[in-house]
Image (cartoon, rainbow, N blue to C red):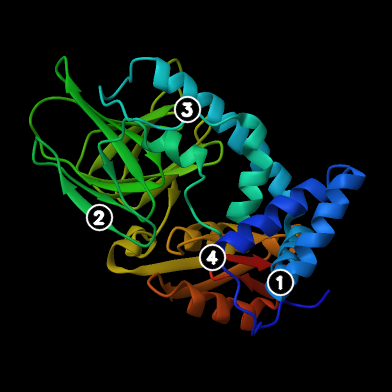
Amino acid sequence: MKAPSDFTVMITPQQRDAALSWLSVLHDRPSIADQARFSRWLQADPAHAEAYAQAQVMWELSEEPAARLAQEDATALDALLKAMDAPAAFSTKRRALPRWSAALAMAACLVLMIGVGLGWQPQRWVDDFGADYVSASGQVRTVTLADQSQVTLDADSAIAVRFADGERHVQLRRGAAFFQVSHTGEPFVVDGGRGETRVLGTQFEVRLQPSGAQVTVLSGRVGVKAAADLPQQILTAGQRVSYDQTRTTAPATVDSENQLAWRQGWLNYYRTPLADVISDLSRYYPGRIVVLNDQLAAKRVSGSFPSKDPQAVLAALKSVVGFEQYQALGRVIVIR
């Protein structure tokens, strides 16, 4: 397969959308009438052929992950609609959001994959629904809570805050956050990935993972529980644990200053799977970065990279790891 080349034909967003629509139609047993209409559309303008060719390339590159993402989006849509009809646990905010049909997930997901825009992200809507503080892609944001505690949100993160009944609760809904907690005498608890981190000290990070969360302590102490009925694991400065729904790992010693350098604009790794590096880097890229090779994703890399320039980081990784990279319309990068 050849990497997409630069085209001289100008393609409008409307033509791009039409090409995606035709691509979806032609992959779903088109009728003779559909085929005739497509032929007329294709011949009507050279830009139509170019738009369709680009859509075909990205379909071939991303058909399998697009199907997977579509299923995730359909699940997220269901959760979003339920959340819209139920009282929010951490906030009373109600936002006027469109009621999308889950049947649109595949087409919309493909639109997202080739970079038409970032408007269709149901999981992001679920995360942000009722959130009190949100950081955008590439934005590291520090906020001060009502008790004067400070929370630094990593790029593309969201939290909800609830101070009530003698306890201070923060729910990490997406991404990662670093906490500097003020001592008021009231418990301070961070909920994330169905577990909780209860503050016994001052400075720590909670980072969501696919099946739970990871907690890193910079100073002081925290108590981590994978679930309410499971034992608490005590962490001190320079320690890290991960937890899922059933267990918490034993504390591991880490260079916490080095691991938390994202607050100063650096991403540091030591023998880390490429998939995890790309996942972090995606927070700083205004689109999506997709790895289509499982063996490649499992390769381990080490290095220190500036988070403000994702393209430069990818170039460095490409020179070390070796992979093919495709970019479409400036909004999606495919690695294989």
Q: Earlier in the sequence, mark 4 or mark 3?
A: 3
Q: Earlier in the sequence, mark 3 or mark 1?
A: 1
Determine which of the numbered discs, if any, sits on residue 80 in the image: 3
Residue receiving disc 4: 331
CA gap between label 3 and label 2 equals 25 Å
- Pair 3/2: label in front: 3
**Residue 230 location in percent, x, y?**
46, 20
Task: Determine the residue positioned at 32% across, 19% down.
Answer: 89
Viewer-nearest residue: 141 or 80: 80
Sort mark 1 into few (<14), some (14-19) or many (20+) by Cα contacts within 10 Å: few
Q: Earlier in the sequence, mark 1 or mark 4?
A: 1
190 in relation to 312, above or below: above
Image quarter of residue 126: top left
**Residue 262 location in percent, x, y?**
35, 63
Task: Determine the residue positioned at 44% across, 58% down.
Answer: 283
CA gap between label 1 and label 2 equals 46 Å
CA gap between label 4 and label 2 equals 23 Å
Residue receiving disc 1: 45
Which image quarter is the N terminus in? bottom right
Task: Determine the residue positioned at 32% across, 47% down.
Answer: 177
- Pair 1/4: label in front: 1
Q: Earlier in the sequence, mark 1 or mark 2?
A: 1
- Pair 3/1: label in front: 1
Q: Amino acid at mark 4?
A: Arg
CA gap between label 3 and label 1 equals 40 Å
Sort mark 4 into few (<14), some (14-19) or many (20+) by Cα contacts within 10 Å: some
114 in relation to 227, above or below: below
Q: Earlier in the sequence, mark 4 or mark 2?
A: 2
Determine which of the numbered discs, if any, sits on residue 141 in the image: 2
Specify whether 223 is left or right of 185. Answer: right
Query: What kind of element bears circle 2?
Result: strand
Task: Determine the residue positioned at 9% across, 26% down.
Answer: 185
